[in-house]
Image (tube, grey):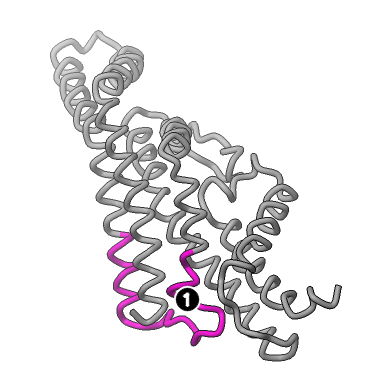
Amino acid sequence: MEALVPVLPAYLLLLTRITAFFVTLPLFSYKSIPATQRVILGAILAWMMVYTIEMPTLAIDGTFIMLVIKEAVIGLFIGIIAFIVMSAIQIAGGFIDFQMGFAMANIIDPQTGAQSPIFGQFLNSFAILLLLILNGHHMLLDGIYYSYQFLPVDGAWPAFGSPNVIKFVVVTFAQVFMIAFQMSIPIVATLFLVDLALGITARTVPQLNIFVVGFPIKIGVSFLVLSIMMAVFVALMQKIIEFMIISMRDLMVLLGGG
């Protein structure tokens, strides 16, 4: 027991960053994974890392409390960036649902507990499966481990307010919307042409109830385009996963003053 006393402060700091990381990180933060299992996984990872990462000798005092706060903020911030990048899939689904007429039919996402567009929920579930197939969850766990190379426990407070970090966050937001637009544009553009054709039909054949006919046509065309462009969707999802890993790494470098 006495041998564990010097290791305990370092273990608590590792556990704080890992559990804070799991709070906002895609896949690990989903409600489908019980909170107890997430805490147990974080405790096991922290126990493995405490003997592989060079940690300073710490005492539990006022400075230690500030280090705990710093570790929690670092974990939350890095996880939020990953969540923002993965939300591009939900944004693309919202664009598609609005054009299909499903915008009023949002459902509760059981993974996050928030309202989600129907098409976005489908694409997000597909992206999570692709993330697991590509071993992206292993890369996310690697990100936790290698974050201590850029942001050591005894390092300075992260540069959250630096111009480079602010610029990075703004550029990341812009790229997320660009990727979402690229993902949704095949179906959105096709449905725009369908709306144009339905509008011409409504003007030439006034007796036809275009609202009754147009809704199933738009749904059928959407699923037809989806089946044709599924390979493009998979490629864009892979691009999103790669962009998420790169964004997490770049953010660690910037927060570490690099």
Q: Residue 83, position in %: x, y? A: 46, 54
Q: Relative to 204, say whether 163 is above or below.
A: below
Q: Residue 43 appears in which quarter of the rendering? A: bottom right
What residue is rendered at 45% in x and 41% in y? 135
Q: Relative to 152, say whether 197 is above or below.
A: above
Quadrant where the N terminus sits is bottom right
Q: Residue furthest bottom?
A: 62
What residue is rendered at 28% in x and 16% in y? 224
What residue is rendered at 63% in x and 78% in y? 69
Q: Residue 18, position in %: x, y? A: 60, 62
Question: In front here: 68 or 183?
Answer: 68
Q: Assess whether residue 4 is covered by the magenta stretch.
A: no
133 displayed left or right of 195: right
> What residue is shown with label 1?
151
Quadrant where the C terminus sits is bottom left
Say which amino acid is labelled 1: Leu
Callout 1 crowding tier (Cα within 10 Å): few <14, some 14–19, many ≥20: many
Q: Residue 100, position in %: x, y? A: 34, 28
Q: Residue 257 appears in which quarter of the rendering? A: bottom left
Asked whether the viewer can see residue 212, the reply is yes
Asked whether the viewer can see residue 104, the reply is no
Q: Residue 123 appears in which quarter of the rendering? A: top left
Question: In front here: 174 or 257?
Answer: 257
19 displayed left or right of 5: left
The magenta stretch spans which residues?
A: 146-173
Q: Residue 124, position in %: x, y? A: 45, 37
Q: Secondary structure at mark 1?
A: loop
Q: Assess whether residue 172 is covered by the magenta stretch.
A: yes
Figure label count: 1
